[in-house]
Image (tube, coloured by chain):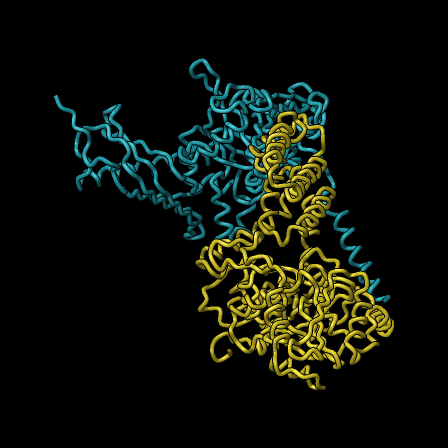
Chain colours: A yellow, B cyan
Amino acid sequence: MMFKHKNKSKKDEEREYRYCSNKSLSKSLDENILLIKGIFNEDDTIIYRYFENQHNNDVKCCIVFVNGMVNAEIINENIIKPVAVNTTLKNSSNVLEIICKRVILSNIVKNSAEIDELIDTLMNGNTVFLIEGVSEFLSINSQGLQNRAIEEPQTEKVLRGPREGFTESLMINLSLVRKKLKTADLKFRFRVIGDRSNTKVCICYIDGVANKKILHELNDRLNKIDIDGILDSGYIEEIIKDAPFSPFKTIGSTERPDVIAGKLLEGRIAILIDGSPTALTAPFIFIENFQANDDYYINFYFSSIGRILRIFGFIINISTPALYIAIVTFHQEMIPTPLLLNISASREGIPFPTTVEALAMLLIFEILRETGLRMPTYIGQALSIVGALVIGQAAVDARFISAPMVIIVAFTGITSLLIPKLSGAGILLRLLLVLLASIVGVYGYLIGIAGLLAYLFEIRSFGVPYLYKLMVLNPMEDLKDTIIRVPWWYLKFRPKLIALNRLRNNSGR
Amino acid sequence: MKYKRKIVIVTLLFIVNTVVLSGCWNYKEINEYAIVSGLAIDKSSEDGSYYITFEVIDFAGSSKNIEFVSDIIQAKGKSIFDAARNAIKTSSKRLYWSHANIMIVSQEVAKDGVVQILDFLNRDHEPRGRMHILISREKTAKELLTYQSITTDIKAFSIDEAIMSENNLSKSLDVIAIDFINMLSEDGISAVLPTIGVVVSNEKRIIELSGAAMFSRDKLIGLLDEEDTKYLLFLKDRIEGGVITLKADKESINDDIVFEILNNKTKITPVFTNGKLSINISVVTKVNIDEVGVNRNILDETSREILKMNAENLLKNNLERLVNRVKKDYRVDIFGFGNIVKKNSPQMWKSIGANWSDLFSDLDINVNVEIELKGSGLLEKPLKIGD
C-alpha cells in the first residue's frame, strides 16, 4: 500500500484540539450553546434558535442547525411547534426522553451526549435539540439538501435497459441499488473516510455470495486510508487498487445501479461514496473492460459480436501504428506488391521518416481528443473542421504527411474511443509498441506484446488474477461470459474465484 | 537477491541476443528503394560477362493521380550480384528485389548453365522463391522487358498476370524458382521452364507465353512448341483447363469438334515384368463439348461412342508421340518417370538410378486414355442451318 501510517494518538490529539471533544455537555443550556459556538467559531451558517413551551416557560430549549442544509418546514412543524404548544411538559430529569418519545414528530431521532456526534449531526443537515437541565441532546432528522434528479448517465448510455443513474446523494444511490435487489442478504456497511471531508462510504455486498476474504481485504485497505478529503470515488480507487502504478484498472467503476446490481449478483463488492455518482466494484478483471451493461439485455448473438469487435478494436488500437511502421520500414517484402507501390508512391516527397510521422500524427490526434473533452461544446464544429480538413486533407495535399499514415491514425483514434475504460492504457501501450517497432521492427512489436501479456498475467485484483476467465482451463465453462456472451440459461455459475457460492439458481440462492 | 539478479541477467541476455542475432536491423524508408518488378539476363558473347536488364517501377503524375511507369535500367557485371550492384550507378537508389516476380533468361545464358543465377537467387535474402523463371524465345531476354504491354505499363506485372491466367489455356507452364531448383536437384526428373516470345499484333509488339524449354542438368537442350507443352502437362498431371480439338471427319478441314477440359487425372505407375521396366500411363479426362462445327446429331448413343473413341485415340497418339520424341531426340526425362520409380521402389532405383538416362531412352510406355463426356453446354443439338 502506498499511503503512510500516521501515529494514531497524535491524530486523536489533533482532533481533540480542534473539536474540544474532551469537553462534554453540561446541564446548562447556555454553557452548551457556548461550547457549540466555540467549536463553530466564525461560522455564520449555524443557526441557534431559542424557544420555550407556551404553558411552562421553565422548559427552555434551543435547536441548532446549519442554514441551507435543513428542511425549514420539518423544523417548524415537527420540532418547534409540538414542543412549544405541548401542555404537559414539565422540567424534569427525563424531559428529553419524553420529548423524544411523545412530542417530536420525526422519523429518525437519536439521543446522545457525545460532542463528535453533535458535530456529525449538524454537518449532515440534521438538527440538534438541546434543553435546559439535561446534559444530552437529540439528533433529529431534518435533512433538506437539494439533489440532482435521477438521470441517465452521460458516459454509459445504453440501447436497451434501465436508464437510471446514480446521483451525488449516497442515500438515493443506495435506494436505487436496493430497488434492484430486494433481499435481506443485501448488506450496506457505512464507514467514514477523510479527516476533514468526513465522507460517508458504503460497502455493499450480498451476504452468502460475496467472498469473505475479499471483503476482509477490502475493509483492511479502507482502514489504512489516511487522507484529509475524499471528493470522488476516484480517490479511493487510486489508493486501494492493486498494481498502483499500472495504467490498467483493477477496480471497476460505473454510474449505473443495474451494473452494480449485476456485479453484486456475481459476488463482487461495491463501494459507494457520498458526493460521487460513480460507484466502485471489486475485484475487477481484464475482460470486464470489454463488457458493456446492455450486453446482458440484448440478443446474445448481437452482444457477442459487440464483444468480439471491442476486443478486436483494442488490439487494433494498440497495434496498428506499430505494425505499420514495422512492416513499412523493416519488412517491405511482407507487403503485397500493389500495396507496396501505393504506399511507396504516397511516401514520395514526404520529409519525415515514418516513425516521426506516426508519432506526430498520434500526438495531434491526442491533442484533438483532449481539446474535444475540455472545450465548451458550442465550438465543437470548429474543432471538427480543423481536425478533418487541416490535419487530414491539407496535410496530405501539402505532402507533410502521407495518406496511409492518416488512415492508420484515424483507425487508431476511432478504436481508442471504442473502449473508454482502456483508453489511458491504450495511449501508453501504443507509444511503447511504436518505439519498439521503430527500433527492431515486428520483432520489437512481438517483444512488446509478450511483455504486455506477461504483465497482465502477473497483476491481480484483490487476489483474483487479472486475466482470470481468459487463461482457459475449462473452455466450456470459463469462456461463457468472456469473448462471447452465451444465453442466460447456460450461465449457471458465478466466477469461481470471485464468488463464495458458485451456483446461480434457486438451490444456490 | 543474488538469485533474482541472475534471472534478470539471463533474461536480458536472451532479449539482447535475439535482437542482435535476428536480422531485423535494417531500418529503411520504403521510398528509398527502387522496386524491381522483373529482370532479364543476357550474356555478352565477347567476354562472357552478364548483362542484366532491370525493370524498375517509377511514379509519374500528380500526387492525387499517381501512375506507375516502368523504367529500364541496364547493368553489366562479372556475376549476377556484381551486375546488380553496378546498377546502383545508374539507378541512384538501391534496387529492392523482394517484389521482383519475373526473371527472363536468354537461351544463350541457359545453354551455358543456370547454376550461378539460381545460387544467387537462393543465397541472397531479397529475391523470392516465388519468382517466375522464363526462357526467352527471342534472341535476347532484354527485348521482352521493352515490349508494349496492353494491360498495365509494368511489363513484368502483365507477364505475371499472363502466367496466372495460363491455367485456362494449358499451353505453357508456371514454374517458380523453388520448383525449378527442386526439379534440378531431384533424381529422375529433368527440369522444364516456360518460354516466352514476342509477336506483332495490330502494329504493337506484344508478348506471347507459349511452349517450354527442356534442360539437361542445368543446361538448356531444346524447346517444345505449345501443343507439345499441353501434352507434357497431361503427363505431369498439371492440366487444369484448356481445349482438345478433334476433326469431326477425316476429310473435312473446318468442321471441328472442340472439347473443353474440365478436369484431368493422370496416373503413372512403373511396372516390372521379367526385370524389365515399363511405364503405365492412365489418363482420365472429363470434358464438355464446347463447339460443334458439323450439322448432324453427334449426341446419340453411337455417335457419342465414336466421338469418345476418336478423342481418346487423338490424345493417346499425341502423348505417345511426345514421349517417344523426347526420349529419342533429347534423352532427358522431363516427365519425371524416374522420380516416380524412385518413390515407388527405392530399392530398384538404387540399381538403375545411375544410368537412368540410358534406360529412359528405350523405355516402354503404355498409354491408356479415358475421356468422360460430361455435357454439351446449353445446346442439345447442333445449330440447324435452314436453306
Vertical placement of residue B63 versus A374, above or below? above
Residue A161 picture location, percent across and down: 48, 59
Q: Quadrant of residue A174?
A: bottom right
Q: Is residue A206 left or right of residue B3?
A: left
Image position, residue A411 (x, y; %): 59, 41
Residue drawn at x 47%, y 63% is: A486
Pick the front one: A353 or A39 = A39
Q: Nearer the viewer, residue B376 or A22?
A: A22
**Total numbered labels:** 0
Q: To which quarter of the image does residue A231 belong?
A: bottom right
User: Is A326 left, or right, of A294 in this rendering?
Assistant: right
Where residue A203 appears, as percent x and y from the top left, is 65, 71
Q: Nearer the viewer, residue A142 or B28?
A: A142
Give the answer, above or below, for where B87 lies relative to B327. Answer: above
- Which residue is the extreme one toward the top? B203
Query: In the rendered view, does A100 fall on the left or right side of A134?
Result: left
Determine the residue positioned at 27% across, 42% down. Answer: B374
